[in-house]
Image (cartoon, rainbow, N blue to C red):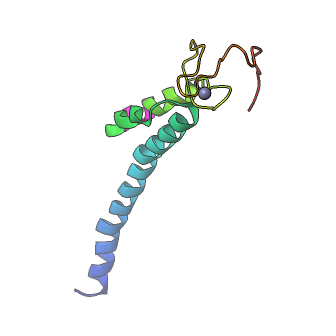
Amino acid sequence: MDGADLLDFVFQVVLPFTVVVLGVLIFWVLPIYLGVRWAREKGYSPLWMLFGINPMGAWIAAAILQVCPPRDRCVECQRFIRKDFEVCPYCRCDQLEFAPEETTGGD
Ligand SMILES: [Zn+2]
């Protein structure tokens, strides 16, 4: 094996392989990473990203998580709870007593 063979090897095997790996990282791992991050931020289960078993599913699940509004938090303990709960299941805090007005905007 001389220098030319090595160059052939680099351009015919290593380079395409690197491009494929980078492509997979960007088009498959990226939506899963973003989806899990958005799920955590908004109070949804990161297990939704199990749709990421398929790259297309990963993009769809990530897009849905991005579009979904964040779940409501308890006014007292800040845990995610359902919107129709009047009492927080975690700290038993009355949700109607505090902050009846919606603070729109945020970020
Ligand atoms: Zn609470």
In the image, is 57 to the left or to the right of 9? right
Instruction: Judge left or right: residue 93 versus residue 10.
Output: right
Picture quadrant of ligand 1:
top right
Residue 11 placement, left or right of 64: left
Q: Is residue 7 above or below residue 104?
A: below
Overall secondary structure of the magenta stretch? helix
Q: Residue at x 35, y 36 (%)?
A: 50
Residue shown at 53%/41% (left/top)? Answer: 37
The residue located at (57%, 12%) in the rendering is: 84
Q: Is residue 54 above or below residue 104?
A: below
Q: Residue at x 44, y 29 (%)?
A: 60
Query: Would you identify the image quadrant in which residue 106 lies?
Result: top right
Residue 79 pos. (x, y %): 58, 31
Q: Position of residue 104 (x, y in %)?
A: 76, 21
Residue 59 visible in rendering: yes
Q: Which residues are magenta?
A: 55-60
